[in-house]
Image (cartoon, rainbow, N blue to C red):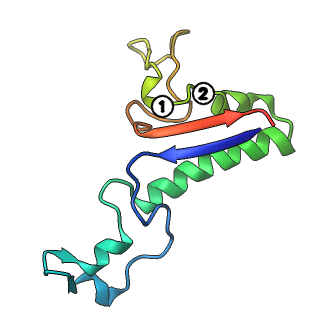
Amino acid sequence: MNGDFTAASVGFSWGAPMPAPKEMQTLKCGDGSWGCGEHYTDAVWDNVRMNNIAQHFVTAFLAKHLKSDATMDSYLNLVENAQDGKWSAEANGTLKSDHTYWRGFRRNTAVGLKLEQRKP
């Protein structure tokens, strides 16, 4: 399987593990309207969240291919654009048969994510 994971509108810091240096967090850059530390952060995509999303897919992929765990298919065989998935659940939270939202993600938490796959 070949795959590309896309997170829409992600800035420079996508999943970067290092926080901005303390000195950069208060220093103003350019015309003074933005902090130099903003170079290290993203207003939308939190580093911890992005790393958790990556871990979610790596865990499913490795379990499927190294442990031959076929139950991981439901975490990997997804509608390409997460927002195209349908959240469909009973009042008690049980997912309905027409539910196509990305498995492992709560409602509206995969917006902006895309998983493209093709066979080798």
Q: Residue furthest bottom?
A: 23
**Whole-Å distance between the Cαs marked 2 and 1?**
8 Å
- Is 79 or 52 nearer to us in this picture? 79
Residue 70 vs residue 8: left or right? right
Residue 82 vs residue 79: left or right? left
The quadrant in which residue 119 appears is top right
Secondary structure at badge 2 equals: loop
Percent coordinates x, y for residue 31 in the rendering: 13, 80
In the picture shown, does residue 99 fall above or below 54?
A: above
Residue 20 vs residue 60: left or right? left
Question: Which amino acid, by three-letter code, is at mark 2?
Answer: Leu
Percent coordinates x, y for residue 61 in the rendering: 73, 43
Q: Which residue is mark 1?
A: 82
- Is 57 or 9 nearer to us in this picture? 9
- Is 54 or 90 nearer to us in this picture? 54
In the picture shown, does residue 61 fall above or below 47?
A: above
Specify the quadrant that holds the N terminus: top right
The quadrant in which residue 60 appears is top right
- The answer to whether the residue labelled 2 contacts the one labelled 1, judged by CB atoms less than 8 Å apart, is yes
Question: Which amino acid, by three-letter code, is at mark 1?
Answer: Ala
Secondary structure at badge 1 equals: helix
Which residue is at 45% across, 18% downward?
Answer: 86
Residue 25 vs residue 96: left or right? left
Percent coordinates x, y for residue 92 in the rendering: 42, 16
Which residue is at 49% across, 31% downward?
Answer: 81
Q: Which mark is residue 120?
A: none
Q: Which residue is mark 2?
A: 78
Which residue is at 71% across, 33% downward?
Answer: 118
